[in-house]
Image (cartoon, grey):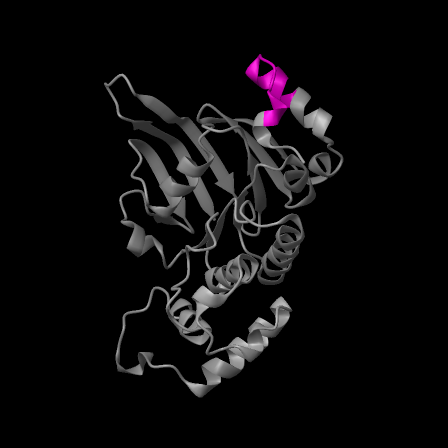
Amino acid sequence: MLEVKDIYKTFFPGTINEKKALTGLSLHLKPGDFVTVIGGNGAGKSTLLNSISGVLRVDKGQIIIDGTDVTKMPEHQRAKYIGRVFQDPMMGTAAGMMIEENLAIASRRGQTPGLRWSQREEDDARFIKLLKELDLGLEDRLTARVGLLSGGQRQALTLLMASLKTPKLLLLDEHTAALDPKTAEKVLDLTQKIVSRDHLTTLMITHNMRDALRFGNRLIMMHEGRILVDVEGEKKKTLKIPDLLQMFEQAAGNELDSDSLLLS
């Protein structure tokens, strides 16, 4: 479903501020894989997601989604393959538009606007059904402006919008980091439900190692632009945080500062 082949990305090359963000990184995701991604600040996690989504153009390497080479494809053209939820709840929705309008736009992602693009009654019935599953009372607020929603409500709505068209790949960039613990847990549970229900191939960045171990069938740990640890299946299920730290230290050859991963 996703094939990342030997990609490189350097910021400010040839200057005093040169930063090698990705250094020959390769990654293969099978259909339905739910992969959690951890690593300290500057490890290259967000750069990886931005490279896959098209926000950044890689210097070298290849990115293939569902058999299509998207390496040189601009971000707006990749949108038909990708759903994405950002760390900031303010991103991913149009604050000045109503809930139903946001959902209508999301349901037509990748389509060319036309005369039949107007909202239909059957759309509202579908949106109400989907919003009920969020269990946030939003099904009774279709005409409410998204900007009036709480951060948790907006993030849940963004997650619903990102998965509405069943993307080939779902990218979650620390999508609970800005939420309080109770709301974050609710959004994570909702994430698990949607990913499992729709069999979505998913990459989820998190700074929380416990969440990285609890969710998904596979875990990768990044460091200095490359993948140092990659565990999946039964081996991942039995891992504890000390095991993960030890695996990193053995792979990196130095001690990991666990505080940098915001353990909680």
In the rendered image, residue 82, in percent from the top left (x then y), is placed at 42, 54
Residue at the outermost bottom position? 121
Residue at the outermost front position? 148
> Is residue 132 depicted above or below 24 in this figure?
below
In the rendered image, residue 7, in percent from the top left (x then y), is placed at 37, 31
Residue 30 can be seen, yes or no: no
Between residues 140 and 34, which one lies in front from this camera angle? Answer: 140
> Where does the magenta region start and end?
247-259
In the rendered image, residue 49, in percent from the top left (x then y), is placed at 43, 42
Residue 240 can be seen, yes or no: yes
Residue drawn 53% across the image and 77% down it? 141
Image label count: 0
Between residues 236 and 120, which one lies in front from this camera angle? Answer: 120
Residue drawn 63% across the image and 57% down it? 196
Instruction: Report the magenta stretch's main SS.
Output: helix
The answer to which image quadrant residue 221 occupies is top right
> Is residue 52 depicted above or below 24 in this figure?
below
Residue drawn 53% across the image and 47% down it? 178
> Residue 256 colored magenta?
yes
> Is residue 161 depicted above or below 251 in this figure?
below
